[in-house]
Amino acid sequence: MTILKKTLHGAIAFLVLAMLAASPSYAISFGNNSSEWAYDGECDDPRFAGPGMADTLLDEDMGRDASDCRNLLNKGRIYIRSGGGDNGVHFGDNSSEWAYDGECDDPRFKGPGMADTLLEEDTGSDASDCRSLYREGSIWLR
């Protein structure tokens, strides 16, 4: 009986993991459907890229086209722009006066996670903030 239980538990665990792996959208926060362009069959969220994307992307649509983006990601027609990792981006160090403030101050990036005022001297000097925001898809390289 014990061997049967262990086998059954193992099979259930395997099935759950297989289902999670088959759905690439599992760990992504897509947000809501409050964009003017939600439910139009194209992803309007600038955190994504690929053939299923709308032609014009606005920062204000980030996290506001959940259904379209989730469906297209699951179909393989879009992908996460930052890939969830660093993609070889050199973030530099944390020597900026504005490091560790929760906003990226490096002018090489853009997106809703950016500081309002960008200074050239902060290029490569806000690594911790920019790396975190890049990995979550709140900023991307220009």
Image (cartoon, rainbow, N blue to C red):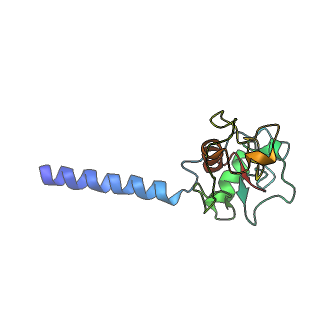
Task: Spot the residue most to the top.
Answer: 101
Quadrant (top left, top right, bottom left, bottom right) of the C terminus: bottom right
Q: Position of residue 24 (x, y in %)?
A: 56, 56
Q: Residue 103's image quarter?
A: top right
Which residue is rendered at x = 61% and y = 50% of the image?
135
Nearest to the observer: residue 39 or residue 48: 48
Q: Is residue 76 visible?
A: yes
Q: Position of residue 33 (x, y in %)?
A: 75, 41
Which residue is rendered at x = 72% and y = 42% of the image?
63
Q: Position of residue 73 (x, y in %)?
A: 65, 58
What is the tally of numbered marks visible in this picture?
Answer: 0
| 58 horizontally vs 45: left or right | right
| 27 horizontally vs 49: left or right | left
Q: Position of residue 50 (x, y in %)?
A: 73, 64
Asked if 119 appears above or below 24 in the picture, the reply is: above
Task: Spot the residue most to the left.
Answer: 1
Which residue is rendered at x = 81% and y = 42% of the image?
118
Q: Is residue 1 visible?
A: no
Q: Residue 129's image quarter?
A: top right
Nearest to the observer: residue 111 or residue 46: 111
Asked if 84 appears above or below 138 in the picture, the reply is: below
| 63 horizontally vs 21: left or right | right
Asked if 122 appears above or below 142 in the picture, the reply is: above
Nearest to the observer: residue 33 or residue 46: 46
